[in-house]
Image (cartoon, rainbow, N blue to C red):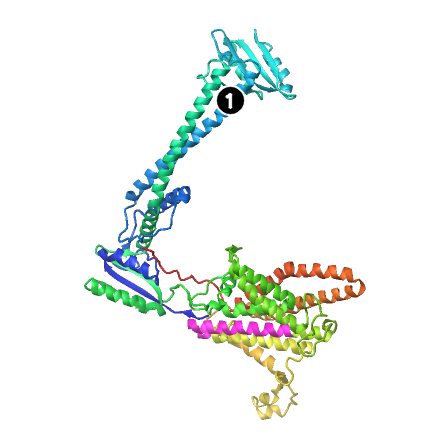
């Protein structure tokens, strides 16, 4: 995809017009504002916005409160017009008031509900005491004695007796509640109360505490509990009504508070990027060239409106500056963005690889996963993903994954039809590719043909990558690197020379009659370099060099020449040459995996075919299992392998992905 060139826009105005310009730039939404540094412009200093963090704090507090009133929020019908940044302390007073009221009522309600819960528990315990004729008035501290009741396990009773044995005049009375629990009533002299409490705290003794308000019989206690419970329920209803009213009132103010805070925070953030003198404000940003007219119309009108108190001008990025990258990707290919962006954003001087990388990934996936039936299933799954309401999977939008699957499924279906594979079966359709018949994999010549095709595809892909790298060098003005660099014309020449030398070494004809290189006899050239008297004394042998050797030597000389021109260390140059020669082979033969996965997929069809001949039931079961296997594990593996070939073998040749995305400043007011 083409990368849109950007211009640097500089705006200088009086401080009085600063916020108006920022607000209107946010409305237009075409400028990515730069963060200027102290001392960058003589006479201007960095703006320090005092309340920047305060706005962020208030936004966080507002969002916390907003979560508590979601049931009362309504769509905003009236448009809120904002013309100035609001002081944060003016907003904080409102937010703090609602925080105190909402949190206060919630705290009171929770406290009352906890009290109600305790009364319910006390009611059960009083009923327990009443069952054994123990009145609440029998428990507590008296003039000479202390009486306490509680629930204890049967197995701990002897431990309790042993622990209290040394205390004088201790009376322990137990009442059976169940096979495992007892109600225990302990009476002891008042001066030994603390000793008894220490013992009870060391055991699993569930003490029955009776409030001071209950001092009579069980009947009186029941009446008190009923009255107290009713009072608490009334209070809870009162507080809940007040809380509801406060939440409704706050929910009505949320749209205003939220918009004011976001607006004020955005203005403060932008001011933090500016430079300012005593009277003037200095603002810079990046704008795509195809959006300049939109900004010009606004600024020219503003100049007339303010009496020419605003100056603006455009300039190209300075040397060493790294402007943001502006991409205009057609909607048809936006799915590929999710794929390529995993590698990074192109910088403005690179070629955007979105379209070509996405197409290569799709083609390689189909090459490795040739199946008409499963390809159609993948396409249908992709359509379901596109219509899914889910948002992301592993950081990639689900809809983008679906669109990628649609393309991959279509290519897989086409390649499957070409070799006659439908749901791992070769018996349903005849291969559409001329010369192929069912069982083509059993012929060694077909496998060799497939491997050659995979390697040829790799050579083309790597060559495209090196050509794009050459183009990038030219865009940056690096002419020497474009011609003599290892990722330029010289590198491309070296790679193709190594490829054709490799084919010649193993005796493979690339394309008969087209890429068969004739030898060049250099004996006559050598004779011309020396004197006739000397040559008459020698008999020169016939010396023939093939074209790939000549081009390989030429590429090596070109790379060494670049090193000499740019005064690079020769040791590094020869190391790089050695690495380039080795990587030429490794990169090229890495594409053999295309044939490998294709063969492995087709081999499954042969296995199933043989099993169906031997045992139809077992073969049918294996057919179902292997189709499920290929649509899960093999599908993921092939996707990853295709992505690996795109990222490592292709994009590393010309793409760094070190760019910054273009993020225009937008402000909804």
Query: Can residue 201 be seen at all in this image of the molecule?
Result: no
Residue at the image position 46 percent from the left and 21 percent from the top: 225
Q: Residue 396 placed where, x, y %?
A: 51, 58
Question: What secondary structure do most residues of the magenta stretch adopt?
Answer: helix
Q: Is residue 206 above or below residue 642?
A: above
Task: Examine the structure image and report whether residue 429 is included in the region drawn in magenta.
Answer: no
* Residue occupying the far right of the picture: 614
- Work out whether 650 lies above or below 73: below
Residue 476 position in % (x across, y down): 42, 71
Decide which of 157, 268 is in the foreground and name it.
157
Whole-percent x, y for residue 195 in the image: 53, 13
Rendering quarter of residue 576:
bottom right
Q: Quadrant of residue 46?
A: bottom left
Q: Which residue is mark 1?
A: 123
> Which range is magenta?
453-480
Q: Which percent across, then down, holds residue 603? A: 72, 66
Looking at the image, residue 177 lies above or below residue 362:
above
Q: Which part of the image, by quadrant, shows the C terminus?
A: bottom left
- Residue at image location 60% in from the left, 80% down from the top: 548
């Amino acid at each position: 995809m083409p990368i849109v060139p950007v211009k640097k826009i500089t705006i200088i105005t009086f401080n009085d017009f600063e916020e108006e310009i920022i607000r209107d730039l946010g409305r237009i939404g075409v400028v990515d504002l730069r963060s200027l540094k102290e001392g960058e412009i003589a006479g201007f200093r960095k703006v320090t916005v005092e309340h920047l963090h305060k706005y962020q704090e208030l936004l966080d507090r507002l969002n916390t409160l907003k979560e508590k009133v979601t049931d009362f929020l309504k769509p905003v019908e009236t448009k809120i017009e904002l013309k100035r940044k609001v002081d944060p302390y003016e907003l904080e007073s409102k937010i703090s008031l609602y925080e105190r009221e909402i949190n206060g009522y919630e705290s009171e309600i929770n406290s009352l509900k906890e009290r109600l819960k305790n009364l319910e528990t006390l009611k059960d315990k009083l009923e327990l005491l009443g069952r054994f004729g123990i009145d609440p008035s029998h428990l507590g501290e008296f003039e000479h004695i202390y009486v306490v009741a509680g629930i204890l396990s049967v197995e701990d009773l002897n431990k309790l007796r042993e622990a209290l044995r040394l205390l004088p005049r201790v009376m322990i009375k137990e009442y059976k509640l169940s096979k495992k629990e007892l109600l225990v009533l302990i009476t002891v002299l008042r001066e030994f109360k603390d000793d008894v409490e220490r013992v009870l705290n060391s055991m699993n003794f569930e003490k029955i505490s009776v409030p001071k308000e209950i001092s009579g019989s069980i009947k009186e206690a029941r009446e008190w509990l009923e009255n107290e419970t009713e009072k608490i329920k009334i209070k809870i209803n009162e507080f809940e009504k007040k809380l509801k009213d406060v939440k409704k009132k706050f929910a009505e103010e949320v749209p205003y508070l939220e918009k004011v805070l976001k607006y004020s925070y955005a203005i403060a953030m932008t001011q933090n990027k500016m430079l300012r003198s005593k009277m003037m404000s200095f603002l810079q940003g990046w704008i795509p060239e195809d959006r300049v007219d939109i900004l010009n119309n606004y600024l020219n009108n503003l100049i007339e409106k303010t009496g020419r108190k605003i100056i603006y001008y455009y300039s190209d990025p300075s040397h060493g500056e790294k402007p943001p990258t502006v991409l205009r990707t057609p909607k048809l290919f936006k799915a590929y963005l999710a794929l390529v962006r995993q590698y990074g954003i192109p910088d403005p001087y690179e070629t955007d690889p979105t379209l070509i990388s996405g197409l290569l990934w799709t083609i390689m996936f189909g090459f490795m996963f040739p199946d008409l039936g499963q390809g159609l299933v993948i396409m249908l799954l992709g359509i379901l993903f596109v219509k899914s309401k889910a948002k992301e999977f592993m950081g990639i939008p689900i809809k983008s994954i679906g669109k990628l699957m649609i393309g991959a499924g279509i290519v897989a279906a086409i390649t499957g039809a070409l070799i006659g594979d439908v749901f791992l079966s070769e018996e349903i359709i005849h291969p559409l590719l001329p010369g192929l018949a069912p069982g083509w994999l059993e012929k060694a010549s077909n496998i060799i043909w497939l491997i050659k095709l995979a390697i040829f595809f790799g050579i083309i892909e790597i060559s495209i990558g090196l050509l794009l790298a050459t183009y990038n060098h030219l865009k940056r003005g690096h002419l020497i690197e474009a011609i003599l660099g290892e990722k330029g014309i010289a590198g491309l020449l070296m790679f193709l020379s190594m490829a054709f030398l490799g084919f010649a070494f193993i005796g493979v004809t690339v394309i008969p009659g087209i890429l068969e290189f004739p030898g060049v006899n250099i004996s006559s050239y050598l004779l011309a370099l020396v004197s006739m008297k000397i040559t008459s004394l020698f008999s020169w042998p016939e010396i023939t060099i093939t074209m790939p050797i000549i081009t390989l030597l030429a590429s090596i000389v070109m790379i060494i020449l670049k090193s000499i021109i740019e005064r690079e260390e020769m040791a590094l140059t020869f190391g790089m040459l050695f690495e380039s020669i080795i990587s030429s082979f490794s990169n090229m033969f890495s594409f053999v995996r295309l044939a490998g996965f294709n063969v492995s997929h087709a081999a499954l069809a042969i296995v199933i075919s043989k099993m169906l001949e031997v045992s139809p039931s077992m073969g049918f079961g294996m057919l179902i299992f292997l189709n499920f296997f290929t649509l899960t594990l093999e599908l993921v593996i092939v996707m990853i392998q295709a992505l690996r070939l795109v990222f490592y073998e292709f994009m590393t040749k010309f793409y760094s992905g070190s760019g910054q995305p273009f993020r225009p400043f937008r402000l909804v007011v």
